[in-house]
Amino acid sequence: MTYVFLETGRLRLRAFTEADVGHLVALDGDPEVMRFLTGGVPTPPETIRARTLRRLLHDHPGPGTRGYWAAEEKSTGTFLGWFEFRPLDDDSPAVIELGYRLNRASWGRGYATEGSRALVDRGFTDLGVERVTANTVTVNRGSRRVMEKSGLTCLRTFNSDWPEPVEGSEQGEVEYELTRATWERRRREQP
């Protein structure tokens, strides 16, 4: 039985298993999915088997053990991609990085926002999280919109050294955040 970390109305976030290799090869093999990560260059299957899967199977200390969760459509069990919700520092669960990578068929259907909101809420209600952070390239409007709909606000724009620049990387990256204090204030203000 696979460990289910979180369920929403339409999603199930579960622990990765070795059997997910094929799903990951398909996900990271789509040039559009990889557009803002590798410039559209697919990740070789050997890299997914040797490095990617190992990273996704790693148990990070702190909130909910692992840090990466396979996302499935709850009604069908269809693999949609993954969500990241892991501590930036393995010694402290106070600051968590939020991330997501979903297959193209699931884009524009609200899954990224639904999963992100549920993770943020669980982090602040059950896991002792104090701050959630997320990054993307400035030009990745879709990802930025998900961050905003999930309650995060843009903290800063910064430049990084990209070993292989991707489309728009010259415009820098953005860091978004949501603190526990802001999240609690917003909940109190809701009607």
Image (cartoon, rainbow, N blue to C red):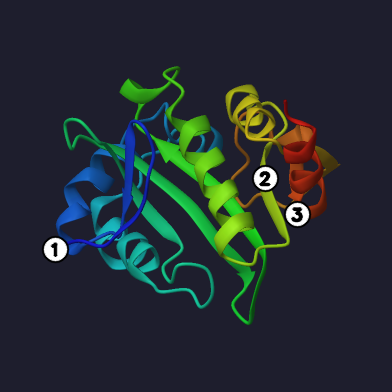
Label 2 CA crowd tier, 10 Å (few <14, some 14–19, many 20+): some
Q: Amino acid at mark 3?
A: Arg
User: Residue 24, relative to residue 32: is it above or below?
Assistant: below
Which numbered disc, 3 or 2, marks the residue that appears first in the sequence?
2
Q: Amino acid at mark 2?
A: Asn
Q: Is residue 119 left or right of residue 151?
A: left
Which numbered disc, 3 or 1, marks the residue that appears first in the sequence?
1
Res. 115 in view: yes
Residue 148: image x %, image y %?
A: 69, 30
Question: In the rendering, which numbered label is found on residue 1?
Answer: 1
Residue lying at 46% horizontally and 39% vertically, measured from the top left: 115
Question: In the rendering, which numbered label is found on residue 142?
Answer: none
Q: Is residue 133 left or right of residue 81?
A: right
Res. 35 in view: no
User: Residue 87, relative to residue 123: is it above or below?
Assistant: below
Q: Nearer the viewer, mark 3 or mark 2?
A: 3
Task: Look at mark 3 in the image and give the residue it sits on.
Answer: 180
Q: Nearer the viewer, mark 1 or mark 2?
A: 1
Q: CA distance from mark 3 to mark 2?
A: 18 Å
